[in-house]
Structures are given as C-alpha cells and as structure tokens.
Amino acid sequence: MTRCTLKGMTIGLLGLTLAGLAAFTPPINIATGSVLLTSAPVDHGSYDRLLKKYVNEKGLVNYKGFKADEKELKKYLDVISNNPPTDKWSKNDQMAYWINAYNAYTIQLILNHYPVSSIKDIGSRIKIPFVTTPWASKFFKIGGEEMSLDNIEHGTLRKKFNEPRIHFALVCAARSCPRLRNEAYEGDKLIAQLDDQGSDFLNNPAKNAITPQKASLSKYFDWYKGDWKENNKSIEYWVNQYSKTKINKDTPISFLDYNWALNEQ
C-alpha cells in the first residue's frame, strides 16, 4: 500500500470522525457562545426542591436559607437562561417557564441585595441611568438577550398569553403579593395551580377582604383592570370565580393599600 493511499485513508477516517463528533455536538447559542442544553421544555425539578426547602405553606421565604444555597439557585437560573421557550413547547409549558423565571429571578434579585426590608428599597441602590425600579433593571439574560422582570411580565406573559390568572402566580417579594407557591409551576399542572392560587388569594382577608356588602380588593384588580376585563369578563367575574363570598355588579369596590414589606419568614 503506498503512502498516498495511507494518507487518503487517514484523511478519510479523520473526516468521518469529525462528522461523527458534529452529530453529537450540542447546539450553541450564537449570541453568547453558551451551550443550549435541550430543546424540550425545561425540567424545573431543582427549583421545585429549593422552593419546598425554603418556602413555607403561607408563601413566606427563608431568604437566609436561599442565600446559603445560592449556588443551586444559580444552576437552575443558568438552565433557564440557556433554554428559552420555543413555539414547539405547549402554551402551558411556555407560561410555566416564564412564571418560574419571574419568581426565581425575583428571589435572586433579593439575594443580590440582601438584607433588605422591601424590594422597593433596591431601586435606590441601582446606579443605572433612567432605571429607578428593580423591575426595570436588566440584571439577567435569557437566550442571550438582556432582560428585566418587566420584560417577563409585561413584554412576554401579558403581551403573548392573554391569561389574567398569571397575576395570582407572579410574586414580587412583597407581603401583599400572592403567596409564593412552594412548588414549581409545571405545564401539565398549570391550570390547576393557577386556580388554586386564585382561590388562596381571593379568600385571604389580608389581601382581599370581601363581604356581601362591600369588597376591599387587592390593588392588582386596580393596576391590571384592563386584563380582568378582557374577553368580556369583569372584576366581578374573577372575584366570584374564586371567592367563597360572592359579589354583584352593585357591590361597592375599593382597593386595599399595598404592603411592600419583604415576604420573609
């Protein structure tokens, strides 16, 4: 066998080897150079375990515990960052992803500035021109794009999905927020989870005080009044969906002051 033939075989084998490696190379995010771990819906199991460990049944958070386990939270957020939803995911899988992302990044934001007595205190610590609230700060990336909590809530969830019940699930680390659920949201359980959140929120007298004579509701029903009225619905409709005490169109409605104290255990 000649050297030319041997050389050809070597090059041929090398080509096959490289082709084989290419077939098993994970996809790369061109914007960041990071490996995209999967095109399937994200596994929220690690986040679920953290929530069960550091969030109680009332939705109050052990931030000191989270701080001690911050590496595990960041590992989950790395998965979130590198695996944005695609149109191949179901609508519920996409919504579960974004709700979990919002809540988990909110926890991370608190940990970045801990200790704080309120998330609103973080605004004065942000030294970015024209950024005065923690929700507008672009402190994380998803799919290589710099994003803020506002981008998730207003630019994605409210804009794309037309699902008012997200307001029962997004938790901005304040006492007047809905409880932070001590489990991750999952696409196949999402509707039941949102319904459970609605029931818990509407029947908590500290957050919605409802009697047959009057309804003192969360500011959520004032701030997002347009969302509750979409699809020919009303605030009355959503209250009666979940509140044990019903109201009617003539029931006087007022809105409670919002308690921005940190939702800490």
Image (spheres, rainbow, N blue to C red):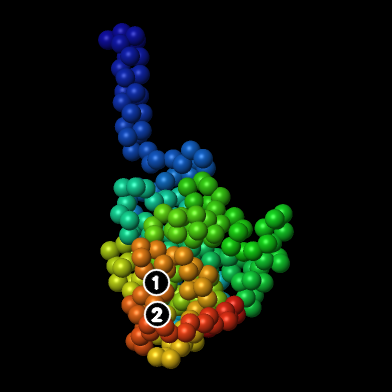
Q: Residues within 10 Å of mark 2 (few under 14, many from 20)?
A: few
Q: CA distance from mark 2 to mark 1?
A: 9 Å
Q: In this orientation, which residue lies closer to the viewer: 92 or 20?
A: 92
Confirm whether residue 256 shows in the render.
yes
In percent of width and height, residue 63 lies at 55, 75
Q: Can you tell which quarter of the image residue 94 is in?
A: bottom left
Say which mark, if any, is on residue 234: 1
- Of the residues tagged 2 and 1, which is closer to the observer? 2
In percent of width and height, residue 197 lies at 38, 76
Q: Can you tell which quarter of the image residue 163 is in?
A: bottom left
C-beta proximity under 8 Å, tags 2 and 1? yes
Q: Earlier in the sequence, mark 2 or mark 1?
A: 1
Q: Residue at x 30, y 72 (%)?
A: 192
In percent of width and height, residue 51 lies at 43, 73
Q: In this orientation, which residue lies closer to the viewer: 26 or 151?
A: 151
To which residue does mark 2 refer? 249
